[in-house]
Amino acid sequence: MNDSWLKQSVEQPLFGDMLWSKPENKRLAGKLLIIGGSVHGFAQTVSLYQSVIRAGVGTVRVVLPDSLRSTLGNSLEDIDYVSSNRSGGFAERSLADLLEQSSWSDGVIFGPELDSNSEDKLLFEKFIHDYSGQLTLVGDPLNFLIALGENYFSRKSTLVVGDLSKLSKLAVKAKSTLAINPTYDLVRVVDAANMLSKNCSINILSMASGNYLLSINGTACTTKEVKKNQNWETDLAGHGAVWWVQHPDKVLEALSCALVEVQS
């Protein structure tokens, strides 16, 4: 048995006892803050919200730029708005509000559809510098992290969710000794992902060769995909973040459970 590569299936999960004993009391099921969206798009952010609900979070709050207020209003439960910039993304002055909101939560998901302007990028950089809790990045925020470079890859309690093309760019910026290429077979991807997660403090969730992939500190867990899911990134980010806040001291076990539950 390769201790650096654990394998499971939906029918035979590695951590069944944990998988089948989720918190029934909402007060014990975690609190998550989702930050995402812009005037140019919010559908994936809504999808992320729905995924978190399906995963059984105790409480969730969604924060959007107020450029979306006239479009969305209060169509989502637990929705809040903060200042937007001229481009319809998050204004830099909203940082204090976002940090205050994050202090309420057990974890934060910086979700997709952020604007690509310099103000959104600067806000993201300042947020991850000041926020020290569990942080899940999916979509545009992962691109922002890659652009910031290796000085930010040592941040503790960071989970990145993305396809192999994004992980490839992350590995290059992190100066990993093993490249990640979407054309590689599963063995090479696992080896490269483990090298990346071992050299950085970042936890990884991805998809490779028809398998959901987790890598934490040089140890991987793979789960065969049993059904196609066009929204796998947001679904995996939502389920992963929920399991993580519910089991903060058992990250490998919790995220391995998320690989199974996301397919239920």
Image (cartoon, rainbow, N blue to C red):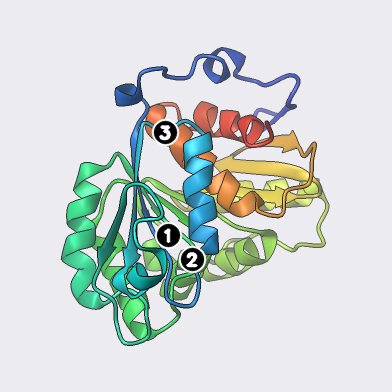
- Residue closest to the eye, 208 or 108: 108
Helix, strand or loop for disc 2: loop
Q: Say what amino acid the circle numbered 2 marks.
A: Phe
Query: How many C-alpha atoms fall within 10 Å of the one at disc 2: few (<14), some, or many (≥20)?
Result: some
Q: Position of residue 189 (x, y in %)?
A: 73, 52
Q: Which residue is mark 3?
A: 57
Mark 1 to mark 2 CA distance (whole Å)? 27 Å
Q: Is residue 74 left or right of residue 238?
A: left
| Residue bearing the label numbered 1 | 153
Which residue is at 32% across, 23% downward? 28
Mark 1 vs mark 2: give the one in front.
2
The CA span between labels 1 and 3 is 27 Å
On screen, 223 above or below 36? Answer: above
Q: Which mark is residue 42?
A: 2
The x, y position of residue 24, in whole percent, is 41, 17
Does dot 3 land on a helix, a strand or a loop? loop
> With respect to residue 236, does 56 lie above or below?
above
Disc 1 crowd rating (10 Å Cα; few below 14, some 14-19, many 20+) is many
